[in-house]
Amino acid sequence: MKPIAIDLFCGAGGMSEGILQAGFHIVFSSDISEDVEKTYTFRHEQLGLIHGENTYFQRADIRNLTSEEILSSIRNLKIFKDKDNIPQVDAIFGGPPCQGFSRAGLRQKDDPRNMLFREYLRIIKDIHPRYVIMENVEGFMDTKMDGYVGVTGDTYDNGSLMPEILINEFSKIGYLTLEPRLLDASNYGVPQRRKRAIFIAYLAGEEVPAYPEPTTPNENEKVTVDEAISDLIVNSGTKEMYFNHHSEYQLSSIYGRTKSITGTPIHSNNHIYNHDLSNHSALIQERFSLFQEGESSSMLKKRIREQGINLIEYPSLLKECVNKLQENYEPEQVIFLFNNPPVDDELINALLTKKNNRYRYNKDNVSPTVVTLPDDYLTPYENRIPTVREMARLQSFDDSFIFLGKRTTGGQRRKVEVPQYTQVGNAVPPLLAKAIGTKIIEAIKASNERRLKIQV
């Protein structure tokens, strides 16, 4: 049988995809969200992983999830029906929610999400898998905690770094730990610069695992945005200009990297799922068209301020500017002022929105980190935000992976709903997870072979 794994905080299934590709069999997984449960279980059914037969998904708050529940769920799977004992769990994978550690927003030492990794350690202590893999945002590496109480009751000094706490906590429950490391997904075939903090622990007596060596370490080897999504251009004329043939990465996405339990990759059958376009007005499209490839909002403002712009080419924006400026300017004056730099801030603020972090992808580079808000980015080819499918491509999901639920949401609903864009943005890139999972399987096999030699 394949090495067996548990996937906690599984989300929509980015980590699962990668460790399945590496060769694990996932016997148990859990997440708190009903929205991700739909996506996760649907995908696993596609792959022949059937709830209650050869895998088990439990929607739960990890604070209420017991190790006995997990082991009982595994023990009652049909694949273990005729066995006296279930095999030892080979690995537990998990990424406790990371917003409390993120550098993208205000980090709070008392954020309750910071405590979820203690619950993760509690389950590890009880189940005692051979290997443990934990991933988180890079901000985890320099987060400090005040008076943190560990899973065995130890209290840490104020200002203790999370990696130091984690290494000590693993030691207390019988694990050795590799030095925590930041891995960049773009070094492993993912068309996205995304750094994740990775922690690997293992029981004494097991083969020492290793971090994966980069497969695409050099800039000229990395998969570009163009190689990832150029075949998804919607406008036929634009597609004719930019798309000539499918890249190797696109073909892998179409034909499928993840295999079903029968060993057959799941082909998308030329269906492009989750590729619905947002309905942008003429004004929004004109505003998007101002962005050049690789240009951010701040870069755009600087360029317009210094070089000006011909607003005759942007009738909707011209009308918008005149309306905002009201009694001060006639259309001819606005056109003249934008054509004669430097352009002052009053005019630029009338032209653009207050949003300062929009960016148009550079098709010849990897993308920045995929996030949960799609309107932070624009495609290189068309004046629109990327679709769920395009963002999934940049994360290295197969095209056959279908995201269910609402496409997007907003306001207070974001606190409880996990729409498709958020499912994609929160995921571990499958190819990064595969690289890590492959090294863990190598260690498991080496441990197994050594034990067999000793027995002989």
Image: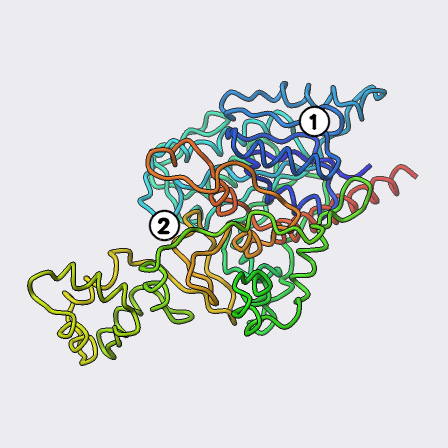
Q: Position of residue 44 (x, y in %)?
A: 68, 36
Q: Position of residue 4 (x, y in %)?
A: 73, 35
Give me the residue at 34% from left, 41% from top: 159
From the image, tell me which residue sits under label 1.
Answer: 51
Image quadrant in which you'd find residue 401: top right
Task: Point out the tag, 2 or 1, that comes first from the N-terminus.
Answer: 1
Q: Position of residue 169 (x, y in %)?
A: 52, 35
Nearer-the-camera pick, 384 or 455: 384
- Amino acid type of disc 1? His
Give me the residue at 56% from left, 47% from top: 274
Q: Is residue 367 left or right of residue 433?
A: left
Kind of element beneath mark 1:
loop
Circle 1 crowding by C-alpha within 10 Å: few under 14, some 14–19, many from 20: some
- Name the outermost residue toward the left: 327
- Name the outermost residue toward the right: 456
- Amino acid type of disc 2? Ala
From the image, tell me which residue sits under label 2.
Answer: 104
